Amino acid sequence: MSILTPSDAGYDEARRSAVWNRLIPDNNPSVIVLAKTEDDVITAVTEAKAAGRQVSIRSGGHSWSGNHIREGATLIDLSAMDSIIEINREAKTAIVEPGAQGTEFLKALMAEDLFFPVGHCVGVGVGGFLLQGGFGWNSRVYGPACMSVTAIDVVTADGQLVRADENNNSDLFWAARGSGPGFFGVVTRFHLKVYDRPKAIVNCAYIYPTDVLEELFTWAHEVGPKVPVQMEMILLPHFSYDGGKEIPVAGATFADSEEEAREVAKILETSPVLDKAIIAIPYVPVDMDAFFGAVHFQYPDNHRWRPDNMWTHASAAELIPGVSEIVRTLPEDPSDTQNFSHLQWMNWQPNHPDSPKRPDMAFSSEDDIFLSAYGVWADPALDATHNKWAGDQMRAMEHLSTGTQLADENLAQRPAPFMTDENYARYDQIKAKYDPDNLFHTWWGRP
């Protein structure tokens, strides 16, 4: 275990490296603990409590808003606790530490012909990803990844290491699946259910000009309920290589056979403007490295990010004016070689007849469509203008929203519900039981 304070060499580097986003909160934890073992975590929690400092936690550092960078806190950095402790092929189970990166975990699983709905982006640690719900690859089939958590080992506010599952400390287990950065404990191990590797992993992609935006999004809305759960249908308006704008429509597909995958892929051929596509790739087998690489291009390192999002089931007629405005105003950075600001529309459809039934858990905000705006820039001089763009766009459409998702949250600027009112109340009761002195920081936007 290493301990750093603001006067120590390496402190500022540790603070900055604890956030993937280069737009880092201007806060300074009093202590940064670089934990390597469960005993390190117990010691850090115990000492923070004795010193009267609140605790925040980092696993992969992909919190968009840097929720864990808190003034005066003890920041427990779990990124070195990155072991894949066990993969049991026969039982289809795994045990991982919170700092394990999803890309590495999935690679290890696929070597055993297994799969798990890890995060889409390279470098995401499983800890924060699973706590906030887990919007991952093939999650329309498996449900949010937190549904595949069967137990956690967690250090509580009193410095005790306990197991929580459906039969032991079940209320703590309930809160761990969906409360995200507000979870009041330090999870040191996740016990997971894993799945057979899909036999056919395929991408389908079409790129359209922006002048068919209205027709394209109207169709995407209409076809949403019919999209098989094996496909992640996403519309991603962004900047093209020539500095203009374009609308990719992609359908990452995970099927049990090539025949099934080809049948699923046909849904994208129902586009009423198919003949307007600039590029058409109806069906191409890919590996996960290709998927991760494509996402990493769209979400590059060393940039400043401010996303915001909403769940909605509003009509296409209600949504398209806001969508059009987002595409029209995508922030640019003249100093960058490529502009990466974009919009994402995903047909999620949690009530699709083939979607798994959701268990009783804190995670409770989802809807037919996931809509997220991403402001991206590299030049700090643009902070004043670009930092508010995504929040302003979502605020203008807030009357159409049924909640937000923690994966791409902007709670520091625009608090929005990510649980039902009933679940917020239940969360508060459980937190009062396990963390009566508020040792653990909760999410931005809450005291």
Image: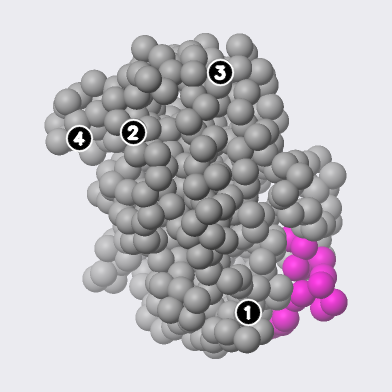
Left or right: 55 as drawn, with respect to 225: left
Residue 118 belongs to the span the image colors magenta:
no
* Disc ID at residue 443: none
Label 2 sits on what residue type? Ala
Q: Residues within 10 Å of mark 3 (few under 14, many from 20)?
A: some
* Disc ID at residue 338: 4
Residue 167 belongs to the span the image colors magenta:
yes
At 64% from the left and 54% from the top, the residue drawn is 141
At 60% from the left and 70% from the top, the residue drawn is 195
What is the x, y in percent for residue 262? Answer: 50, 47
Q: Check the image and report above or below for 2 versus 130.
A: below
Label 4 SS: loop
For the residues labelled 3 and 4, the Cα–Cα distance comes to 29 Å
What is the x, y in percent for residue 368? Answer: 67, 34
* Disc ID at residue 92: 1
Label located before the other in sequence (3 or 4): 3
* Disc ID at residue 280: 2
Mark 4–mark 2 contact, CB under 8 Å?
no
Per the rendered image, the range of residues in magenta is 158-175
What is the x, y in percent for residue 124? Answer: 43, 60
For the residues labelled 4 and 1, the Cα–Cα distance comes to 42 Å
For the residues labelled 1 and 3, the Cα–Cα distance comes to 41 Å
Q: Check the image and report above or below for 337 versus 325.
A: below
Q: Nearer the viewer, mark 2 or mark 1?
A: 2
Q: Nearer the viewer, mark 3 or mark 4?
A: 3
For the residues labelled 4 and 2, the Cα–Cα distance comes to 23 Å
Q: Which residue is mark 3?
A: 218
